[in-house]
Image (cartoon, rainbow, N blue to C red):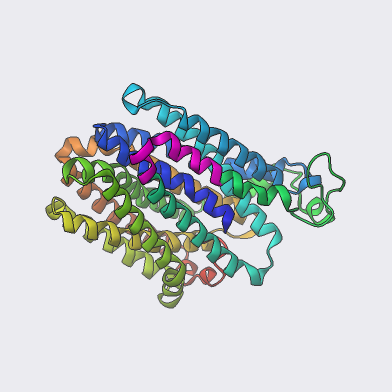
Amino acid sequence: MLLYAAQGAPEGLLYIAIPAWFASQGIGAEAIAGYIAIILLPWSFKLFNGVLMDRFTWLPMGRKRPWLILAQLLLIGSLIWFAGLSSPEAGLTWFAIAGFAVNFAGAFQDVSIDGMAIDILSEEERASANGLMWGGKTLGTAGFAFLSGYLISDQGHALAAIVTAVFVALVMLLPVLLRERPGEKLMPWSSGKASSANRDVQVSQWWPFMKKLWRAMRTPASLMLAIGILVAFAAYGLKTAFSPTLAVEELGWARERFTNRDASADLLGGLFGIFVSGWLADKIGPMKALGGALLGMALLNGAAIVWWTSDDFYYVYLLAYSVLFVLMSVCTYAIAMGQSQGGVAATQFSIFMALLNFGTSLGAAQLGAAKDLGGYAAAFGACSALSVIAIIFYLAATLLNRQLSRSTVLSDQEMRL
């Protein structure tokens, strides 16, 4: 839970507080969208991170623990670099590069935490553990969105980044002081040896694995699902890109007001994810729940085409969108798990998740084109249309693989994150 809080903290800074600060400094919507698109890109590489970690590690310190410690050191260093940057007017490009570095380290940390959890948790522990992990990330993101917003107002972005780095450093004491398995080395110079359990599962042959993965991904159901994920999360990326400038520049919200309201929406979505989304998807089926979430997002964005200039409406929009997005995400994970089968299931699932993150980045990069077509109304219209298109591809995937409509993996919640 604490490791995931340390993963969520930089997201609260980079995704909510910093874009709002940029908007208050007069940075245009297209420039902020470019920043968001660039910093999100490392999450598209999670597949390669997982393959690299599975193939290469130093077993005397554990399968994932060495990677986790390295990732957190890189995360701390990149946050300090971010803190040392000057004002955004002097070079927004460097903010994007430093944000890319932060997320590059964060993506490695994410994969290593998930891999460690899968390695060391028993079946009966995974549901409760992943619920806590989801809650940890939600609280980390929302909490540091609030905190970073206030620190930026009082002292500037440097202090906000340093405080985030200090929090990550404190949490890093956990993997530094706790072994992954009994008998392993605490540090490279400590006594200990690799566990037999880790030696038995270490990957050694690649070619047979890659052939199985290719066969799994080229099935019609997998291809339809991959396109659906890409399109659905492109809509989310586009919304993430225009939200801060719309609120600050068009609606006249103070930076602190937007930061607080967006963080409140994120917190509401996280709590919905912990307590409601899994139960709801299990109750009616993940495909029905997903279709309802996407339809709700399409209608919500359709209404925003007309009413986005209303202050009260946009606040309700943020709250409702957060809940619908969490439901869409949780159901997407469940359906992707249902499509990922056999000895390549974990890596196939990673491919779907990489497409999810790439779609988010790709959508954010399209804000300029959407605004050229008709301003923010056109951007909302594009989000609505993308949600409808995504429904079609998800439905096609389900028709090609009927098991996806009645997946029960959410009762375990292993991959909900």
Residue for point 41% across, 31% down: 96
Which of 334/148 is in front?
148
The image position of residue 314, as x and y in percent, is: 21, 55
Note whether 139 is above or below 84 in the view shown.
Answer: below
Can residue 362 be seen in the rendering of this structure? no
Left or right position of 188 against 25:
right
Question: Residue at 14% of width from left, 40% of height from top?
Answer: 374
Residue 171 position, x and y percent, is: 60, 50
* Residue appearing at x 42%, y 59% in the figure: 329
**Residue 215 place in picture, x, y as percent:** 58, 50
Residue situated in front as seen by the camera: 174 or 44: 174
Q: In the visual, does 380 lie left or right of 307?
A: right
Which contiguous range is marked in magenta?
A: 150-167
Q: Residue furthest bottom?
A: 283
Q: Main secondary structure of the magenta part?
A: helix
As for residue 151 lying within the magenta part, the answer is yes
Horizontally, is 188 left or right of 348 in the view?
A: right
Q: Residue 295, located in which quarter of the rendered image? A: bottom left
